[in-house]
Image (cartoon, coloured by chain):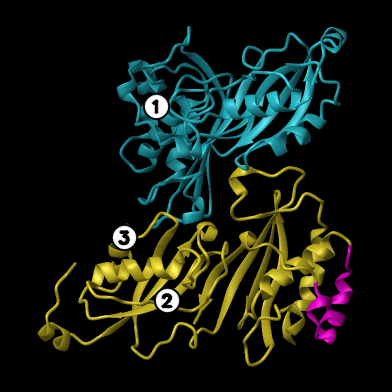
Chain colours: A cyan, B yellow
Amino acid sequence: MKNINENEKTENPLRRIKLTVAYDGTNYVGWQTQPNGVSIEEKLDGAVSRLTGRPTRVIGASRTDSGVHALGAVCTFDTDMQMPAEKFTFALNPLLPDDIVIQASEEVDITFHPRYDAKGKIYVYKILNRRLNLPLQRFDTYFYYKSLDVERMDEAAQHLQGTHDFISFASPHFTAKTTIRTLYECNVRKDGDIITIYVKGDGFLYNMVRIIAGTLIRVGAGAMEPSQIPAIFDAKDRDAAGPTAPAKGLTLVETLY
Amino acid sequence: MKNINENEKTENPLRRIKLTVAYDGTNYVGWQTQPNGVSIEEKLDGAVSRLTGRPTRVIGASRTDSGVHALGAVCTFDTDMQMPAEKFTFALNPLLPDDIVIQASEEVDITFHPRYDAKGKIYVYKILNRRLNLPLQRFDTYFYYKSLDVERMDEAAQHLQGTHDFISFASPHFTAKTTIRTLYECNVRKDGDIITIYVKGDGFLYNMVRIIAGTLIRVGAGAMEPSQIPAIFDAKDRDAAGPTAPAKGLTLVETLY
């Protein structure tokens, strides 16, 4: 621990550091600290507090669920440490477990807020679509053994693009003020045995990407038509959409500013 | 457990079943049973014994090291069970942990030997080559942060192709009668941040693929020239080649018959 005396405390003004974080969410209760297990957030709080020598909490842009992964989650913390901003990455990584790796650190304006200033996010949902599961892919793909028709899924994905009321694609537990969201891009591609659902939007309701994935899987399996998507929007009813696909297939790829 | 009386034992002749097995080797001491931890082999022995109702041991084609993975490891076992051969896959998988998944089962001639009848093997060695590690790839790639020149690595790989005395590329602990081996194919490709070394050969000495990988990494990092490969063969000296790359990057892709 570093000792910081009162003089230093008043001499160095606080700076806000933005971290871009990748993690394997398998062994966590999710981003947010909860009573029933270990969170990503508390691991980052611990590393930052240890480095800066004083109790510090990070503020995250996205509260991913248990089992959801990230390549580009974003959080900030405030510190008076005088280290060059990009060095925080290399100073913090040794204080973190193997399944959390900071990818970048930069100084931002002290008024920057990771959640309120975010302009959008990119997620991918990965499905391992083959007859038998593959052990090395069991943590970051959802294994689905029945053959899925990717062209149908992609056709349905086109209908999801644009500005809509996504209330049918939100878990009833949501707390958002409005359920109108814009998907800038939504497509489905296949590479070998892996089907990837790509979504880029201005914001996402609770479980929205997983419900989109569950709905597109239903379309790919032939249980729903791509042309039914507009009717799901019109229903404004969670039950009109498909099931919530498992968390493990979901990765937050990028937080856009 | 199934009870099999003496009459049944003599009525049903033994059949030999060939299994193709995929596994994540992270949590195992390797293929072969050892006193100091859990092996892939003993997990398969346990599943087959439980299914058939009598103590049964599998015979493997390859004894992969601790941490090495497989998509196409092969083993056989003998049984008098009258189940259609392809059903063993689905009967055994529920008896195995998540990190071992049988991909295929078929009946072979009772004289078939998985090791002696193998005509060759395909391995890949995967390197995650970027500035910072990615948590989701930490189990099946070797993270190397310094930028590697893939063209140089591929040029060196060309020199490795063909029939050579691979004694310089073998751990001194090998037990093979001859150190002459043929590499039918050896190449290096890059896709995003992942560099893949592909090797297809008639057989491999102990640690041979990992020493090839360690040597190619040295070439890619600029510490060795592609043109030095013939001199490494000529030296017939393990110290002439590069270091043994870590086990975690290695996957046995296919066993050829």
Q: In this view, does A257 lie above or below A72?
A: above
Q: Quadrant of residue A101?
A: top right
Predominant secondary structure, magenta span: helix
Same chain for mark 1 and mark 2? The answer is: no
Q: x, y (%) of residue A128?
A: 46, 49
Dot 1 corresponds to which residue? A229
- Of A102 and A166, the residue lying toward us: A102
Q: Pointer 1: residues within 10 angstroms few (<14), some, or many (20+)?
A: many
Query: What is the total number of numbered labels drawn onto the structure image?
Result: 3
At x 89%, y 69%, the residue is: B225
Dot 3 corresponds to which residue? B95
Question: Depth-wise, is mark 1 or mark 2 nearer the camera?
Answer: 2
Instruction: Please tell me which of labels 2 and 3 falls first in the chain.
Output: 2
Q: x, y (%) of residue B237?
A: 81, 82
At x 87%, y 81%, the residue is: B231
| Tag 2 subunit | B
| Tag 3 subunit | B
At x 70%, y 73%, the residue is: B186
**Magenta-colored span:** B223-241
Is B229 part of what is drawn in magenta?
yes
* SS at circle 2: strand
In the rendered structure, the answer to whether residue A19 lies left or right of residue A67 reads right
Dot 2 corresponds to which residue? B75
Q: In which quarter of the image is residue B80?
A: bottom left
Disc 2 and disc 3 in contact, CB within 8 angstroms: no
Q: The disc labelled 1 sits on which kind of residue?
A: Ile
